[in-house]
Amino acid sequence: MIGYYPVNTIVKLNTQEIAKVVKVTSNAIFRPEIVLLNDKDGNKLDVPVYIKLSEHPELSIDEIIKIEE
């Protein structure tokens, strides 16, 4: 499914963390499932963190960094 944030899009969260969109569902196209790649200081995470944005109202996508295909 293609949503507002297509799968593989790199985004910056309101927390300044960098993440990759890994899944978009039809009932939450603006709240995709993501994997955190970098912390707020830009450091690459040793273990990526999987997050369903629909379950974390305190988190939001602030900007698209890159759309990958």
Image (cartoon, rainbow, N blue to C red):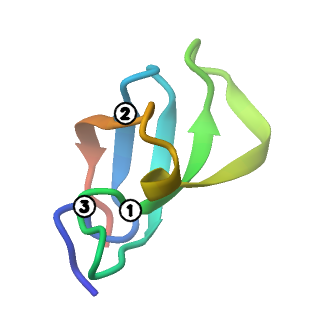
Q: List the residue tagged with mark 2.
A: 12
Q: Residue at x 50, y 44 (%)?
A: 56
Q: Where is residue 34 in the image (x, y as percent from the top left)?
A: 51, 56
Q: Does 3 sit left or right of 39 as displayed?
A: left
Callout 1 crowding tier (Cα within 10 Å): few <14, some 14–19, many ≥20: many
> What mark, if any, has residue 5 been given in the picture?
3
**CB contact under 8 Å: marks 1 and 3:** yes
Going by the numbered disc 3, the residue's amino acid type is Tyr
Of labels 1 and 3, the one closer to you = 1
Q: List the residue tagged with mark 1.
A: 32
Of labels 1 and 2, the one closer to you = 1
Q: Earlier in the sequence, mark 1 or mark 3?
A: 3
Q: Position of residue 13 (x, y in %)?
A: 39, 32
Callout 2 crowding tier (Cα within 10 Å): few <14, some 14–19, many ≥20: many
- Towards the viewer: 24 or 47: 24
> What mark, if any, has residue 7 been given in the picture?
none
Going by the numbered disc 2, the residue's amino acid type is Lys
